């Protein structure tokens, strides 16, 4: 019997999390620690895990567009940054014995498979971690939206978003020490309160498909495992 309450999970990682304290690029210590966490979870043999990774540690398309760069071109550059992160994460996972496949929404057959839904599901059924890169393949969509889309496409039981803070707050806890964390909150309340959990497109996609979202922090190291076991970790958005 599985020790987890979910069997198929989509995990969203931001690019900034891979940069660690250096703020830019990929910190080998951080990505190795993340791989160790995921290896411990996958060792149970009872979880199907897909990951969508952002690219903000290398390039942010929206930020570049505000400086005058064409938005579509900036977003394509950002999508390529997500592929770099996905390949780094793949290498770290396979170094600790976790079999993976990278699927990219932008074709680059030398380094990644093209995204094919049925193939991704088959990889998951065989126990491989599937890392989705390249966003949706289209400009004007965030990696949060890409993650929500992939979670719906693969029929994930839950969408888990790892953030810098341990859940959803009524204001920014990094600037307001009196901010209150929600243990549970509805998607509609997130939208009406404009809580900035994810962009409105991603939130609406999850809400329309009744996909639960857990917002949590990767620290301490066993937090994700506890959430998968059904403990009240972070914030549940439903």
Image: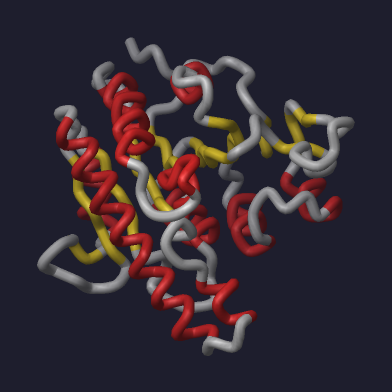
Q: Quadrant of residue 94?
A: top left
Q: Residue furthest left?
A: 110
Residue 27: image location, x then y, percent: 36, 43
Name, please, the residue furthest toward the right.
Answer: 178
When the figure is inspected, residue 191 is found, relative to residue 90, above or below; the finding is below
Residue 165, how many percent across, how many down?
65, 35
Left or right, 47 with respect to 228, comes to: left
Residue found farthest to the front: 22
Kindly identify the residue that appears in the image at 52 percent across and 89 percent down: 70
Tell me the residue at 78%/54% (across/down): 191
Give the quadrant of residue 127.
Answer: top left
Q: Is residue 9 above or below residue 193?
A: above
Tally of marks: 0
Q: Is residue 67 above or below residue 107?
A: below
- Compared across the picture, whether 18 is left or right of 126 comes to right
Q: Is residue 12 visible?
A: no
Please state the horizontal and vertical placement of residue 212, each as a whole percent of the image: 59, 39
Visible residue check, residue 236: yes
Q: Residue at x 29, y 59 (%)?
A: 84
How was this image coloured? secondary structure
Quadrant where the C terminus sits is top right
Residue 103 in percent (x, y) is at 25, 58
Give left or right: position of 73 versus 231: left
Residue displayed at 57% across by 51% down: 209
> Residue 104 versus residue 47: which sits nearer the camera?
104
């Amino acid at each position: 019997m599985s020790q987890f309450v979910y069997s198929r999970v989509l995990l969203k990682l931001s690019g900034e999390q891979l940069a660690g304290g250096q703020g830019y690029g990929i910190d080998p210590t951080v990505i190795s620690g993340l791989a160790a966490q995921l290896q411990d979870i996958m060792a149970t043999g009872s979880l199907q895990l897909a990951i969508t990774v952002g690219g903000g540690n290398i390039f942010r398309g929206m930020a570049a567009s505000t400086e005058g760069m064409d938005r579509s071109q900036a977003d394509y550059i950002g999508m390529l940054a997500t592929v770099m992160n996905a390949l780094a994460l793949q290498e770290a996972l396979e170094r600790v014995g976790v079999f993976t496949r990278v699927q990219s929404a932008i074709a680059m057959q030398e380094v990644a498979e093209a995204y094919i839904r049925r193939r991704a599901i088959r990889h998951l059924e065989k126990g491989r971690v599937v890392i989705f890169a390249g966003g949706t393949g289209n400009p004007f969509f965030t990696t949060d939206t890409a993650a929500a889309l992939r979670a719906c496409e693969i029929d994930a039981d839950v969408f888990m978003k790892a953030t810098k803070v341990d859940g959803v707050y009524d204001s920014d806890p990094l600037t307001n020490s009196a901010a209150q964390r929600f243990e549970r909150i509805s998607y509609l309340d997130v939208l009406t309160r404009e809580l900035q959990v994810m962009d409105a497109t991603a939130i609406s996609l999850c809400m329309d498909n009744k996909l639960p979202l857990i917002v949590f922090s990767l620290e301490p190291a066993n937090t994700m495992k506890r959430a998968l076991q059904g403990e009240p970790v972070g914030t549940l958005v439903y």
